[in-house]
Image: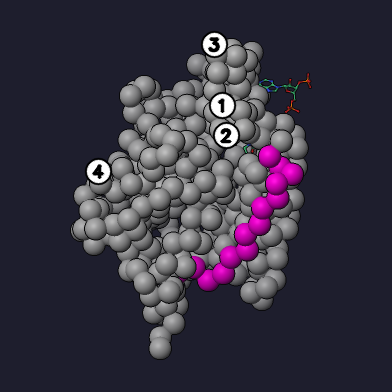
Amino acid sequence: MEKITAAITGVGSYVPDYRLTNQELETMVETNDEWIVSRTGIKERRILKDENAGTSFMAIRAAEALIENHNVDPQSIELVIVCTASPDLKAASTAVYTASQIGATNAFGFDLDAACSSFLYGMSVAARYIESGKYKRVLLIGADKCSSFIDYTDRATCIIFGDGAGAVLFEPNTEGYGIQDEELRSDGVGREFLNVKAGGSLLHTTEDTVKQGLHYVRQDGKTVFKQAVSKMADISEMILEKNNITHSDIQWMAAHQANKRIIDATANRLGIEKDKVLINIENYGNTTSATLPLLIADFEKQFKKGDRILFTTFGGGFTWGAMIVTWAY
Ligand code: COA
């Protein structure tokens, strides 16, 4: 039997219109454009201002863009996965709603949350469904309305995060294109360094938790920074070595966009040249589950069939990993 690989065959994205610039943040917290750009590389982020619109609003639009760009019949989609750390609702999947709204009425759906590694883990899950031969069209969406858990008086977090969504379609490939290999890891020691304390089953929301601002994300930025660089570089080195290839065999590095200094340091350690490193953090900030599909969407036109892309992420939990994908079109 022919070997089936899972290839990306289409992409779409959506970011809200509203641009929260560093200049506007200067009026909200004690910060300045020079500090933010030099410490993070971020110039602006997009914010979904409509209070009645949740993550699905962006997931639906990203999926619709894909459907239109690549002329996909929504009824042919068999599975919709929404990677997100900010689902619309608890106990009612954002993916299920998204699937219905885009007309993917033959699909089943579920959400997947591994913080900033959600989309990488999601690519792994999508690949297994395709490689098994069970399904032929899996729609993987990364979407987060980070502004729903940001305290806009906390300069340690509000300068970093933004909202957005991206979608990719996975289909079977028998020529060897698509996902080649992956290494995924997690470590629960990380949960104290980056989390939203209230609103989960450990501490449910009360008047008191709201007063204390425990429904907002908090992080120990320095610890997260150091861990992100070492884990992404270690696991990327491991996957290259395992596949008997070096940095010169990689055409593009697509790393989670959390901080430009983290991406640069990781690329440096791997010896990957600057012009191979995909960066769009200046426009969107850290959109959590959406950074990888937004990169794919923004750089799609530059990819050539057969290009080898190294994906790597690090996120809360901690969660991290690396994946090698060859571009299929
Ligand atoms: N504007 C201006 N000054 C700021 C600031 C801001 N927004 N935030 C912090 N500072 C100040 C600090 O108070 C500190 O001042 P001091 O030296 O007088 O005490 C100084 O800048 C350095 O602060 P520090 O927290 O050490 O900065 P940093 O270089 O570690 O950068 C982050 C902070 C958050 C940008 C960085 O740690 C980071 O990106 N961490 C990883 C975050 C991440 O990836 N999160 C998502 C997980 S995927």
Q: Residues within 10 Å of mark 4 (few under 14, many from 20)?
A: some
Q: Which residue is mark 1?
A: 204
Residue depicted at x 46% and y 66%:
127
Quarter of the picture containing the N terminus is: bottom left
Label 4, on which residue?
101
| Residue at 71% across, 35% down | 193
Residue under pointer 3: 27
Q: Secondary structure at mark 4?
A: helix
Question: Dots 1 and 2: beta carbons under 8 Å?
Answer: yes
Q: Identify the secondary structure beneath mark 1.
A: loop
Quadrant holding the C terminus: bottom left
Mark 2 vs mark 4: in front: 2
Task: Give the mark nearer the N terminus: 2 vs 3.
Answer: 3
Q: CA distance from mark 1 to mark 3?
A: 32 Å
Question: Which amino acid type corresponds to the residue marked 2 in the rendered image?
Answer: Ser
- Scheme of image coloration: one colour
Above or below, 284 relative to 305: above
According to the picture, the residue beneath numbered tag 2 turns out to be 201
Respond yes or no on whether mark 3 lies under 8 Å from ligand 1.
no
Relative to 15, is 283 on the left or the right? Answer: right
Indicate yes or no whether the magenta region holds residue 149.
no
Look at label 1 and name its amino acid: His
Q: CA distance from mark 4 to mark 1?
A: 30 Å
Mark in the foreground, 1 or 3: 1
Distance Cα–Cα, label 2 vs label 4: 29 Å
Query: How far is mark 3 from mark 4, CA to CA?
Result: 38 Å
Type of the residue with mark 4: Gln
Judge by depth and name the residue closer to the eye, 163 or 41: 163
- Circles 1, 3 touching at the beta carbon (< 8 Å): no
